[in-house]
Amino acid sequence: MDKLLRNKKAIAFFMLPAFILFTLVLFIPIVQSVYYSFCDYKGITAPVFIGLDNYKNLLSDKTFGIALKNSFFFLIFSCVSQLIIGLFYAALLTNIQKGRNAFKNIIYLPCVLSSAALGLLWMFIFSPKLGISQLLEKWGVENPPLWLMDTKGTIILPMWVIAFVSLWQYVGQSMMLYMAQISGISKSLFEASYIDGCTKAMTFRHITLPLIRPMVATAMSLNAIGSLKFFDLIFNMTEGGPNHKTEVLATHLYQQGFKYFKYGYASAIGVVLLILCLLVTLFINKLVKTEQYEM
């Protein structure tokens, strides 16, 4: 085995399929998108190079500003809420013996369901004529909130509704990642801390949290990238409305590219989204400093 690992030709042979797949599926489309972002491209005629015009138009695009604000809202909300609630679920279920698998499966189940189907389901639940609004009217509430249509406030009510729906769907993913890391910690460390008089809260703070920092960084990076390219739930629940108030970068990109056929402009939005994902990932890795411990 050691001889095989030292053979550069064997290493190159085994890496070649993955390299070809990465090049065809990821690298070439990214390079094409970067090129198209500097072009006036309708998809039918040949792209015409126009320099930085698409990026200049982004600065005066009010919908892009709304989409950028909403994407940052999802970014902050997702990272903070899934970190806190995911850790809470992981710590709670790790200490539960009876029914742990049942609760774990219930919390994780929404992650494996279709986001498009869930988006339609929650759209009907929050519809003014169905679901929650009807129940509130039966209970005596005369004017129930317009869950998906209220446009008041800096962060409007539909954005909060969609954010909590996304939290419900994806918190199970963070929980599973934290549980996997916690289960790898030696039980002797916990036993020693209890012998020394530590409470469970002290043990969690001084032993569990430092040892799961690498997974915290990984989970936060996944949450951040997922929230920045958030699309399916919001598109099926509001389609970016009302009046583009719930647009995010991914839905604005979709609208410009596949509805108005402005592929060059949509590519510019995609490049901005890619840069934001890279910057946020670097920031999280710098923020959550990790160290290697023997567990």
Image: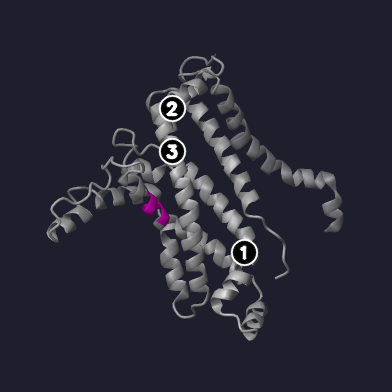
Residue identified by numbered label 2? 257
Q: Position of residue 242 (x, y in %)?
A: 29, 36
Q: Contact, CB < 8 Å: mark 2 with mark 1?
A: no
Picture residue at 48% right of the left edge, 67% below the top: 88
Figure label count: 3
| Residue 91's disc number | none
- Name the quadrant of the C terminus: bottom right
Relative depth, front residue between 269 and 76? 76
Q: Earlier in the sequence, mark 2 or mark 3?
A: 3
Q: Is residue 85 magenta?
A: no
**Relative depth, front residue between 119 and 57:** 57
Element marked by disc 1 = loop
- At a point 58% along the width and 31% down the height, the residue shown is 29
Q: Position of residue 37 (x, y in %)?
A: 54, 23
Name the dominant secondary structure of the magenta segment: helix
Mark number displayed over residue 212: 1
Magenta segment: 163-167
C-alpha span from label 2 to label 3: 20 Å
Q: Which residue is mark 3?
A: 69
Q: Report which quarter residue 170 is drawn in.
A: bottom left
Report if residue 188 is visible in the image: yes
Residue 1 quadrant = bottom right
* Residue 197 relative to residue 176: left or right: right
For label 3, the SS is helix
In the drawing, does residue 213 fall left or right of residue 82? right
* Residue occupying image coordinates x 51% and y 17%: 53
